[in-house]
Amino acid sequence: MQPDVADRLRRLNREFYQAFAEPFAATRRRLQPGAAAVLGRLPRQASILDLGCGSGEVARALHRRGHHGVYLGLDECAPLLEQARAAGAPPAEFATVDLAEPGWTAACRPPYDWVLAFAVLHHLPGTARHSFLDGVRAVLAPGGFFAFSVWQFQHSERLLRRIVPWSSVGIDPSQLDAGDHLLDWRHGGRGLRYVHAFEIGELEALARQTGFRWVDRFESDGQGGRLGLYAVWSPDRASEARSGAQL
């Protein structure tokens, strides 16, 4: 994917979340079952970096569970972060950061025991996924874990009917990657979002390319329990050692 096309996709999503922050947050007042299952694994004292934290529902859930470790939530959408801060879930902190930019780690104070990214990776186009995951690996503590989810809307006939032709935003589909889609939004108005539908083999390749190994995976959420694929990765130290030996 050419950089200018990736920039257009990022801009499309940025404009969507700025315009629909309020109705979007209203649909995220509780955690998805899969996200709640992941949080149930986290020690109360763990240091946590929550990427794409949105309106702060993960921070509130952790607070209710008695979490008392470091928590930092990062998101690009200032209106959503205003809601996260207003909710008050000490000792949570929040910062506005574009996670598609390679320098996003400058906003962090690593290392972190757990890095979370629920419903983030499928909004990152092309090579932005690689730089994002490079950053995740860089801020993880030794023995730390990366837990994330991707949206499997392809398992829902209702959601498949929301796919919109790329011609509606003047983008030639030949310029995109396989699995790239444009979906409409119907709460509080009509909007459009870029979403990538991952195949499991694609995620496996992405893990290898960015120096991670699989720890766990499971499906959850929605009717039939298959709308979200959840995964836990950890840095592949053997891969890192091999890379270092080649330098």
Image (cartoon, rainbow, N blue to C red):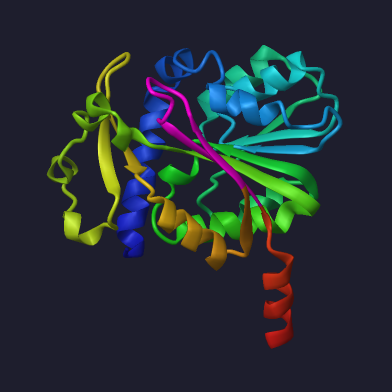
- Specify the farthest residue to the bottom: 246
Position above or below: 164 against 197: above
Residue lying at 84% horizontally and 31% vertically, measured from the top left:
69
Picture quarter with the N terminus: bottom left
Tell me, yes or no, if residue 247 can be seen here: no
What residue range appears in magenta? 216-233
The mark tally for this picture is 0
Position above or below: 120 against 199: above
Picture quarter with the C terminus: bottom right
**Helix, strand or loop for the magenta stretch, by majority:** strand
Residue lying at 35% horizontally and 55% vertically, measured from the top left:
6
Residue 224 horizontal/vertical position (percent)? 38, 23
Q: Is residue 224 magenta?
A: yes
Lateral position of residue 221 relative to residue 90, left or right: left
Residue lying at 67% horizontally and 20% vertically, measured from the top left:
85
The one of 195 and 75 positioned closer to us in this rendering: 195
Residue 181 horizontal/vertical position (percent)? 27, 43
Lateral position of residue 166 relative to residue 134, left or right: left
Residue lying at 23% horizontally and 28% vertically, measured from the top left:
157
Position above or below: 17 against 90: below
The one of 177 and 106 positioned closer to us in this rendering: 177
Residue 34 horizontal/vertical position (percent)? 55, 27
